Image (cartoon, coloured by chain):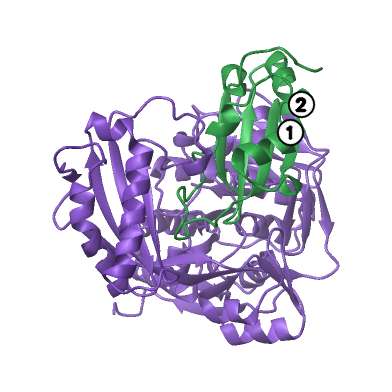
């Protein structure tokens, strides 16, 4: 399924979007959907892509890992932190507020 | 009541009570009583993690407070002694340094004396000296984990403390040697919970998966604030349920826990192999219990130990100043950029500092401090901003001097269009706060082990109520 002209964002249809450290050098983001329809929208081709994640989080797309888990209606994104947890220039020790850029991803597929 | 089972059938179901996600976080005596009534064979709990940042490992101090940790320990040790079951604590003292193990061991010794209990306590240490790590590095036995590169000796030399993550083998050895209370240094969260069922011969796939599911206590339930969980592992799977009769586990709440603080939700590396939950099935047994089957464990050809190290990255001083003036807030980026450039220039010109030896960072809380350059929403000016200036330098005196130099400019720096010098709102007097050393995690590497006990040390104490109090 491919969504192309939806004007909504992931945050509009997901039940929960969260972020957290996965060890001091990685951050992981989870999008939980409450039903199959919203999962279908978020998991569709072109919505959560390595290129979009790399652009929003200014990380190397080669390091972006994306998992789709239909059984629990989750899309998961992991990538290395730009600075390690709690170091002098870190702004978010637990990486607990890093979900917001992902929440704002459009459901419309990226145009490539 | 105290008799330890001998010659256990390898498929004897084994139950582990996990009171909370972290020792010191608190739980109720009722929840422990209930877990023991449910047939707990062991109590296991984690005492730390890297999640609170590098300071605790860098300083070998605990994030938790002694009163809270001691209160939790007393409840567990007394209940476990009555039931004749062991208590296993991992990653003692937040980061699992030797000092962290000793800190918890001292509390345990006091509790045993005060409660009049005779118990054998094992202390398992996994802090590593820089010399040992350098030797292994020179021998080509240390390898990077993504996203790290090859380890440099100079990085090892910078570390204030280095710990290795223990697997279950040393914990099992301590239990088999008669320990009633096992206090482990840095351990994987899962090894602490998996050790007892693995010792009993439970299947490794279900055991490691159960341990991962329960490692944060109630996090795998529908209401994480309602206390811990109990899991039972056997030959084919595991069953998990909350200690609180009013809470519940659902297939979704249990399956979702593989996501938590995990970069990969299907495969998780442990010292002796990899848990693979790709084919796991999650079935509700009733409205509060979930059964999981199909998890696999792939044994690694050689045992390894992940290393964590914390080094000093500089010394900091900070100043918090409040900005409410709408004129400044409407041109916030211009104001902050101008102020920052002025301060960097002044630190060089007035303080005589080499600009490569310090940084001044401006964080606008209320505007974009949290996400920084990733902030997607800067359309409206904020109502109020807390500007946190962080000066980082090679020593505290220099960092503090930057804050003191910056003080009048943080107080009065105007926009170019302003006809009068504004005054902003310092949060207190003095305006500057020394933060001391700022640490950073610098190791993301594994070391090959000679065997599963390599680089760990076990010490035993028989703490007897007959000994006088110290």
Q: Assess disc 2: are there few (<14), some (14-19) or many (≥20) residues with their C-alpha within 10 Å of its C-alpha.
A: many
Callout 2: helix, strand or loop?
loop
Which chain gets the purple colouring? B
Q: Nearer the viewer, residue B152 or B173?
A: B152
Q: Nearer the viewer, residue B5 or B107?
A: B107
Chain at tag 1: A
Q: Is residue B394 left or right of residue A38?
A: left
Q: Is residue B118 left or right of residue B238?
A: left
Using the image, determine if residue B26 lies above or below residue B405.
above
Q: Residue B84 location in percent, x, y?
A: 53, 59
Q: Residue at x 24, y 36 (%)?
A: B417
Residue topped by disc 1: A49
Q: Is residue B186 visible?
A: yes
Callout 1: helix, strand or loop?
loop
Q: Is residue B253 visible?
A: no
Q: Which mark is residue A46?
A: 2
Kindly indicate the quadrant of the structure image that contains residue B131: bottom right
Using the image, determine if residue A59 lies above or below residue B94.
above
Label 1 – label 2 distance at C-alpha:
6 Å
Q: Assess disc 1: are there few (<14), some (14-19) or many (≥20) residues with their C-alpha within 10 Å of its C-alpha.
A: some
User: CB atoms at circles 1 and 2 under 8 Å apart?
Assistant: yes
């Amino acid at each position: 399924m491919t969504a192309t002209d939806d004007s909504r964002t992931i945050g509009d249809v997901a039940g929960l979007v969260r972020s957290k450290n996965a060890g001091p050098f990685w951050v992981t983001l989870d999008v939980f959907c409450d039903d199959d329809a919203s999962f279908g929208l978020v998991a569709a081709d072109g919505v959560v892509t390595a290129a979009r994640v790399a652009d929003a989080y200014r990380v190397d797309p080669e390091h972006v890992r994306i998992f789709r888990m239909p059984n629990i209606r989750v899309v998961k994104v992991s990538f290395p932190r730009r600075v390690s947890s709690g170091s002098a220039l870190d702004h978010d020790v637990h990486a607990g507020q890093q979900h917001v850029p992902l929440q704002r991803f459009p459901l419309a597929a990226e145009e490539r | 009541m105290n008799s330890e089972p001998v010659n256990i059938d390898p498929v004897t179901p084994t139950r582990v009570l996990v009171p909370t996600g972290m020792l010191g976080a608190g739980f109720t005596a009722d929840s422990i009583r209930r877990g023991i009534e449910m047939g707990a064979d062991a109590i296991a709990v984690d005492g730390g993690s890297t999640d609170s940042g590098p300071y605790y490992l860098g300083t070998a101090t605990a994030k938790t407070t002694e009163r809270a940790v001691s209160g939790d320990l007393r409840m567990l040790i007394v209940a476990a002694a009555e039931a004749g079951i062991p208590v296993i604590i991992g990653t003692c003292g937040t980061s699992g340094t030797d000092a962290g193990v000793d800190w918890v061991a001292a509390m345990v010794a006091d509790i045993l004396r005060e409660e009049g209990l005779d118990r054998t306590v094992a202390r398992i240490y996994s802090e590593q000296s820089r010399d040992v790590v350098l030797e292994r590095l020179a021998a080509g036995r240390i390898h990077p984990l993504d996203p790290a590169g090859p380890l440099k000796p100079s990085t090892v030399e910078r570390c204030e403390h280095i710990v290795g993550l223990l697997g279950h083998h040393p914990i099992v050895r301590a239990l088999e040697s008669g320990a009633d209370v096992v206090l482990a240094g840095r351990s994987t969260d899962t090894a602490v919970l998996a050790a007892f069922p693995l010792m009993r011969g439970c299947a490794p796939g279900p055991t490691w998966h159960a341990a991962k599911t329960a490692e944060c206590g109630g996090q795998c339930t529908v209401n994480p604030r309602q206390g811990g969980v109990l899991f039972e592992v056997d030959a084919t799977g595991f069953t998990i349920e909350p200690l609180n009769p009013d809470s519940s586990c659902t297939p979704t709440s249990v399956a979702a826990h593989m996501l938590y603080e995990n970069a990969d939700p299907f495969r998780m590396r442990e010292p002796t192999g990899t848990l693979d939950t790709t084919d796991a099935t999650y079935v509700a047994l009733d409205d509060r219990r979930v059964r999981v089957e199909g998890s696999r464990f792939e044994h690694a050809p050689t045992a390894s130990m992940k290393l964590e190290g914390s080094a000093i990255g500089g010394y900091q001083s900070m100043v918090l100043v409040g900005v409410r003036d709408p004129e400044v807030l409407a041109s916030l980026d211009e104001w902050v950029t101008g102020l920052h450039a002025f301060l960097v220039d002044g630190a060089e010109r007035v303080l005589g500092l080499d600009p490569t030896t310090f940084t001044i960072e401006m964080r606008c809380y209320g505007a974009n401090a949290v996400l920084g350059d990733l902030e997607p929403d800067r359309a409206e000016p904020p109502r109020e901003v807390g500007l946190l200036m962080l000066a980082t330098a090679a020593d505290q005196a220099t960092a503090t001097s930057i804050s003191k130099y910056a003080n009048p400019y943080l107080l009065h720096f105007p926009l170019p269009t302003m006809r009068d010098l504004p005054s902003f709102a310092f949060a207190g007097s003095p305006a500057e706060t020394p933060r001391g050393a700022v640490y950073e995690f610098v190791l993301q590497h594994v070391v090959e082990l000679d065997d599963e006990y390599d680089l760990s040390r076990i010490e035993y104490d028989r703490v007897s109520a007959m000994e006088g109090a110290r």
